[in-house]
Image (cartoon, grey):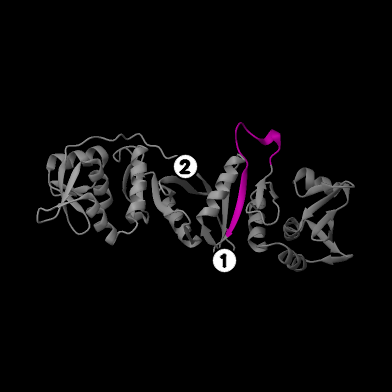
Amino acid sequence: MQISGELYNDKIIIKKPKDVGRLFNKSHFGNTVTGNKLQIDLLEGVFLKSEDKIRLFQNKKELNFEDIVRIASQSISEFEIKYLTFKDLRNRGHMIKICKENDPIAFYQFKQKKDIIDSEKPFVVSIFSERGIFDFEEIRSLINRVENEKNILWFALVDEEGDITYYEVSKLDLKGDNKEYDYQKAKGFLLENRVVLFDKKISKSLFEKEFFGKPFGDGLQLSFVEALYLSEKGFIEVFENDGEKVLEEKFRRKILESQPDVDLRYLVLKDLKNRGLLVKTGFKFGAHFRAYSTKPDETHAEYLVNVVEKGFKSTWAEISRAVRLAHSVNKEIVFARVNKNKIEYIKFGRLRP
């Protein structure tokens, strides 16, 4: 026998005690109200109607699925992506409850005390449309809030066909077990887009100990950001082909001509090195860097790191491509947010709820 509900002022009221028990006690829909009745949200009503589990009435007239969808879409902001996500998660067996309207967190996982195992945290869900804007500051604020509340943050990204991609999003305290070394000073010769070392011994040491550069004959070719780092450390001096020494400030200005974001990337490279990671270009993976927590001959790079500055915005399509690519090569995508000299790392991981 189907449950019956009456629509009053954008809420659905369930009156029969047996129906209240089935929905609230067993499936955790809605909230109890005065008179031992159950009040369920329009979104829950649309879901139950789509599953043919409820009959809905308004002023004694029975509503069909189209009727309740029209009513709900007028009352609930971003109705379609919320409904599609709610339906998907409920059908996957997740007991989720609806948050307040206009809260950036749409749903939270309902857990009874007896269901919580050890320190397992409940998840909360924020929903985005494929056509929405990826606003890094809003996402950072969400992460801070959710971590303060000791929950796990999921993003549900709904595309225009109604398919949903889920991400788990969190801060990441990157750590590696690689140490930094001292090197004898070497001469580096400036080419158009790289610096080349010809000292065979020093080149071998830089490459084998900290994976700097790439072999160039018996020497080593360094990216500009690597050369800048080694120059600041005092391990290389950069010279023009005519033998004129290039001072560090002039070298930085030259790099800026072709790489306007070099200062941001350099700050992140330094921070990653200080955290014990080995850092290489991530260009072939569509990222700024790839990072290793241990020696490259012991593991592949675990992380792809994209450098962004405070206030960064993008499209969700770009973020989806970055996460998908990282996932396909068994790496984690990390965004390094630079605010002056402070750097925060935020990880996006694909998940299957």
Q: Is residue 314 left or right of residue 91?
A: left
Numbered range of the magenta stretch: 111-128
Measuring from the top left, give residue 29's x and y in whole percent: 75, 49
Q: What residue lies at 79% left-to-right and 43% top-to-bottom? A: 25
Q: Are marks 2 and 1 in contact (CB under 8 Å)?
A: no
Measuring from the top left, give residue 40's x and y in whole percent: 78, 53
Amino acid type shown at disc 2: Leu
Within the magenta stretch, is there residue 272?
Answer: no
Amino acid type shown at disc 1: Glu
Circle 2 — which element? loop
> CA–CA distance between discs 2 and 1?
31 Å
Residue 62: quarter of image: bottom right
Observer-side mark, 2 or 1, equals 2
Tell me if mark 1 has few (under 14), some (14-19) or many (20+) residues whose alpha carbon lies within 10 angstroms of its own: few
Residue 82: quarter of image: bottom right
Measuring from the top left, give residue 324's x and y in whole percent: 45, 55
Residue for badge 2? 172
Nearest the viewer among 9 and 189 is 189
The disc at residue 160 is: 1
Q: Is residue 300 visible?
A: no
